[in-house]
Image: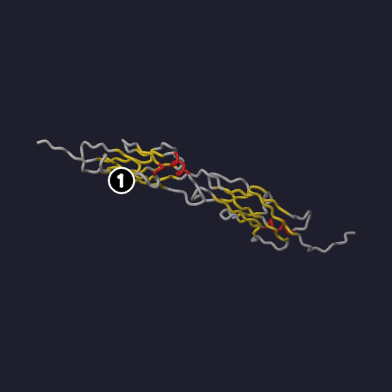
C-alpha cells in the first residue's frame, strides 16, 4: 500500500532568539537566530523577514539558516540618538514557509547604549550684580546642558576665571554663586574697583567633556564713600 504524503502542516519555530548588541553595531552583524521544523518530512523550510512588518528595512535573514543580520538602515536606527529617549530594543518579525504553509514569529533584539557623545552647554547666562547688595547666596551665572546619551550624569566645573576663588558652582545644577572671598573682593573699594569678572565652565558626563562656555559677571559700583582731603 503506497501512501502519498501531503503538505498539511505549517512549520513550527523551535528557536526565536534575539541577541544583545552594542548601539554601534555595523551592517552585517548577527542580531537574532530562528529555527523552524516541519512535520512534513519532505518540506523545505525557508525564512524571510515578514512582509510589511514595521522593522522590515532594518534586517536581512538567511533564507536557509534563519540567521538575522542588520542592514545599513538597521545599523543607523540602532545608533540613532536624539534628545528624546534612545531606543533600547527592536523587534524582528520572521516568517517560516514550507512553500504551502507558513508561520510567523518574533524576537527582541536588545541594544546596549554606549557613552559616545560629549555633553553640550546649551545656555550660559552671566549677570549684573551691584556692589554692597550681594551675599554668598547671590546667583551670578547659570549654565544648562544636555547629552544625547540617555542616563548620563552631568557634572559642572569652573575651568577658568576662578584663580582667586571668587566663585562656587553647584556641580549638579550649573548654578554659580559667590564665595566669601568673592563678596569681599567685589565690595572692596581698595585699589582698582572690580567692574567685571570673566568665568568659564565645562560639563562632563564622566567620559566626555563639553567645550568651555564663557560668561561675564558685570559689577555695578555704587557711590558709598565720602571723599577725603589728604593734605
Left or right of residue 24: residue 4? left
Residue under label 1, please give it: 104
48 to 223, vertically: above or below: above
Quarter of the view holding residue 75: top left
Residue placed most toward the observer, 206 or 40: 40
51 to 124, vertically: above or below: above
* Figure quadrant of the C terminus: bottom right
Residue placed most toward the observer, 131 or 80: 80
* Figure quadrant of the N terminus: top left
Query: Residue 200 location, x and y as percent?
Result: 65, 49
Give the colour scheme of this rendering: secondary structure
Residue placed most toward the observer, 161 or 18: 18
Secondary structure beneath dot 1 equals: strand
Quarter of the view holding residue 17: top left
Q: Write the residue at 24% across / 43% down.
A: 10
121 to 62, vertically: above or below: below
Query: Residue 38 location, x and y as percent?
Result: 23, 40
Q: Write the residue at 66% across / 49% down.
A: 214
Q: How many labels, in total?
A: 1
Q: Residue furthest right?
A: 231
Query: Residue 51 location, x and y as percent?
Result: 36, 44
The crowding category of the residue bearing disc 1, from other C-alpha atoms within 10 Å (few below 14, some 14 to 19, many at least 20), is some
Query: Residue 140 location, x and y as percent?
Result: 66, 57
Amino acid at each position: 500500500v503506497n501512501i502519498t504524503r501531503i503538505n498539511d502542516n505549517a512549520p513550527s519555530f523551535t528557536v526565536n532568539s534575539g541577541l544583545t548588541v552594542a548601539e554601534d553595531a555595523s551592517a552585517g552583524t548577527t542580531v537574532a537566530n530562528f529555527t523552524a521544523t516541519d512535520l512534513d518530512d519532505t518540506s523545505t523550510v525557508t525564512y524571510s523577514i515578514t512582509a510589511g512588518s514595521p522593522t522590515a528595512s532594518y534586517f536581512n535573514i538567511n533564507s536557509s539558516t534563519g540567521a538575522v543580520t542588520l542592514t545599513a538602515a538597521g545599523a543607523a536606527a540602532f545608533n540613532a540618538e536624539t534628545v528624546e529617549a534612545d531606543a533600547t530594543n527592536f523587534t524582528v518579525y520572521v516568517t517560516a514557509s514550507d512553500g504551502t504553509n507558513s508561520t510567523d514569529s518574533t524576537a527582541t533584539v536588545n541594544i546596549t547604549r554606549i557613552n559616545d557623545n560629549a555633553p553640550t552647554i546649551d545656555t550660559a547666562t552671566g549677570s549684573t550684580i551691584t556692589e554692597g547688595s550681594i551675599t554668598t547666596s547671590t546667583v551670578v551665572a547659570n549654565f544648562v546642558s544636555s547629552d544625547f546619551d540617555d542616563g548620563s550624569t552631568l557634572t559642572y566645573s569652573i575651568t577658568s576665571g576662578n584663580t582667586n576663588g571668587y566663585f562656587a558652582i553647584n556641580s549638579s545644577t550649573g548654578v554659580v554663586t559667590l564665595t566669601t572671598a568673592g563678596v569681599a573682593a567685589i565690595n572692596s573699594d581698595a585699589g582698582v574697583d572690580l567692574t567685571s569678572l570673566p568665568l568659564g565652565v565645562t560639563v562632563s558626563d564622566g567620559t566626555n567633556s563639553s567645550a568651555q562656555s564663557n560668561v561675564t559677571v558685570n559689577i555695578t559700583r555704587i557711590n558709598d564713600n565720602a571723599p577725603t582731603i589728604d593734605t
